[in-house]
Image (tube, helix red, strand yellow):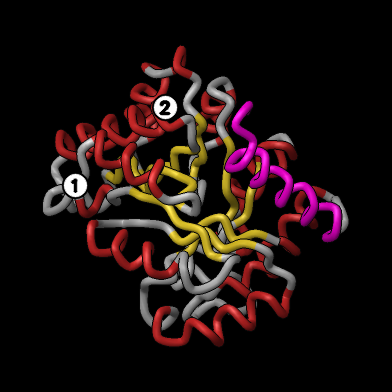
């Protein structure tokens, strides 16, 4: 298994890192991708990727954070090229649900990240909430550059997913797909092609059933995988192989 999106620099994970890693390995996780959300987060990630061979990182600014911190495109590109274990750009995108940052600032930052990911030929880790039309419109503007798009913690509509498939996007399933009230999302993941699906925890947030209410951690990804395998009517081992291979293809196949 591979947790394609977690936040190891957040509490309580960071102060219990050895235990978190031990539990991750015990359930069969091979890689953890810990995601940058702001300038300080990225600094922490540069330290985290040195802690264990299984930890990889990204560089980016979450849309909630773009009013107070940001990266220039050239800096993202330089940092990506400098560190072998920084393998993605993001998370970035648009969040109009909370609107913690002005829409115009979010859009400007999103475009910087998209252009940096294209220059690096690496995956773009996209956060999109209550902004389906704007997110798609901006990504579609770069269609001819073939961006490598990963829709993190995808909770969008099936119509949004269909349009994103035209951009060759990948979709990451989080613990939300295990929630009883997530019927439409579950239906969307049933619809999505198997070769476009990854799994994630987004830990320490969004713990899956039966761990809901607890602080999430990477080892809980086993429950998301199990639920996804039932949705797709594929045995858990095969679903594990599929999602792992999709991660490897997206993040480590430079021809993709």
Q: Can residue 181 be seen from the camera position used here?
A: no
Q: Is 202 left, or right, of 244 in this rendering?
A: left
The mark that comes first in sequence, 2 or 1, is 1
Q: Which residues are magenta?
A: 236-256
Give above or below for 146 relative to 180: above
Residue 75 part of the magenta-drawn span: no
Residue 81: percent from left, percent from top: 40, 41
Residue depicted at x 34% and y 44%: 92
Residue depicted at x 44% and y 38%: 124
In the picture of the structure, the residue carrying the numbered disc 2 is: 118
Q: Residues within 10 Å of mark 1 (few under 14, many from 20)?
A: some
Give above or below for 220 relative to 188: below
Residue 54: percent from left, percent from top: 60, 66
In the picture of the structure, the residue carrying the numbered disc 1 is: 70
Residue 27: percent from left, percent from top: 72, 76
Residue 38: percent from left, percent from top: 25, 57
Q: Is 86 left, or right, of 167 in this rendering?
A: left
Q: Is 33 left, or right, of 94 in this rendering?
A: right
Residue 255 part of the magenta-drawn span: yes
Q: Can residue 125 be seen from the camera position used here?
A: yes
């Amino acid at each position: 298994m591979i947790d394609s999106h977690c936040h190891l620099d957040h509490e309580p994970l960071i102060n219990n890192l050895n235990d978190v890693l031990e539990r991750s390995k015990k359930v069969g996780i091979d890689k953890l991708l810990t995601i940058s959300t702001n300038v300080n987060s990225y600094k922490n990630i540069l330290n985290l990727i040195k802690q264990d061979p299984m930890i990889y990182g990204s560089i980016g600014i979450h849309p909630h954070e773009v009013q107070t911190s940001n990266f220039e495109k050239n800096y993202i590109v330089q940092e990506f090229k400098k560190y072998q274990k920084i393998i993605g750009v993001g998370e970035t995108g648009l969040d109009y649900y909370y609107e913690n940052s002005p829409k115009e600032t979010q859009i400007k930052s999103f475009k910087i990240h998209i252009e940096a990911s294209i220059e690096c030929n690496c995956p773009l880790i996209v956060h999109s909430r209550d902004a389906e039309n704007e997110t798609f419109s901006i990504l579609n503007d770069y269609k001819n550059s073939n961006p490598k798009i990963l829709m993190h913690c995808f909770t969008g509509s099936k119509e949004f997913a269909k349009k994103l498939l035209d951009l060759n996007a990948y979709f990451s399933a989080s613990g939300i797909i295990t929630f009883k009230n997530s019927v439409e999302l579950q239906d969307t993941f049933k619809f999505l092609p198997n070769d476009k699906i990854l799994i994630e925890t987004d830990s320490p947030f969004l713990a899956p059933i039966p761990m809901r209410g607890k602080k999430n951690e990477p080892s809980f990804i086993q429950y998301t995988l199990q639920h996804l395998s039932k949705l797709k009517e594929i045995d858990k081992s095969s679903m594990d192989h599929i999602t792992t291979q999709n991660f490897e293809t997206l993040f480590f196949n430079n021809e993709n």
